[in-house]
Image (cartoon, grey):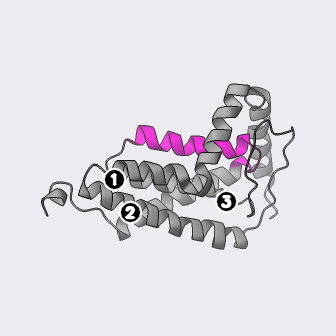
Amino acid sequence: MNEPAIVTRFDAAVDNFFDRHLRGRPLVDRVFYSASALGDFSLIWHLVGAARGVRSDRDAHAAVRLSVCLGIESALVNGALKSLLPRNRPRARVARPLRLRSPKTTSFPSGHASAGFTAATLITDAGGSSIVWYPLAAAVGLSRVHVSVHHASDVAAGAIVGVALGQIAKRVWPLPDPTTADEE
């Protein structure tokens, strides 16, 4: 994938920021490597959905919707989009201080970011706080820049795709009305 110069400059600027201010700091490394690992296979989002799902029938319905939609998101992003828009992953500029699962797909867009923002959109729709879930999605997405497996533009594109897929899912699969959901 031959990206425009503005994208290359954006990716380089973000990467340089991570090099100067974040990478190589043990606590920051531990947080970002952990966020990246929790984002593998959307684990964090399935766990959040399951935990929230025990509260009521409506929340259980939302948890099922979340997991099904994350499966569809993964097939679309990691299957279709990445094969249509192949892009090389960045090379780590320093040795990785912690263990990391090696991605098998190409770089664009970030599946961790798209899954995170799909999840944040659906969890917020189910009554979750956007102040919690969108920043967590951003942290998982940015963790992929920190661990040098995605360019910042991959994460930005993944976030946009994730919000779009979440909005589509909300329209196609709305949750039951909260005032009547547990009365049935």
User: CB under 8 Å between callouts 1 and 2?
Assistant: yes
Name the residue beneath numbered marker 2: 64
Q: How crowded is mark 2: few (under 14 residues within 10 Å), some or many (20 or more)?
A: some
Q: Where is residue 2 in the image (x, y as percent from the top left)?
A: 82, 63
Q: Residue at 62% across / 53% down in the picture?
A: 40
Name the residue beneath numbered marker 3: 109
Q: Residue at 75% across / 63% down in the picture?
A: 106
- Where disc 1 sits, the SS reads helix
Magenta region, residue range: 129-152
- Sequence-first tag of 3 and 2: 2
Name the residue beneath numbered marker 1: 53
Cα separation, mark 1 vs mark 3, equals 29 Å
Residue 122: in magenta span? no
Q: Amino acid type of disc 1?
A: Gly
Mostly what secondary structure, the magenta segment?
helix
- Sequence-first tag of 1 and 3: 1
The quarter of the rendered structure image containing the N terminus is bottom right
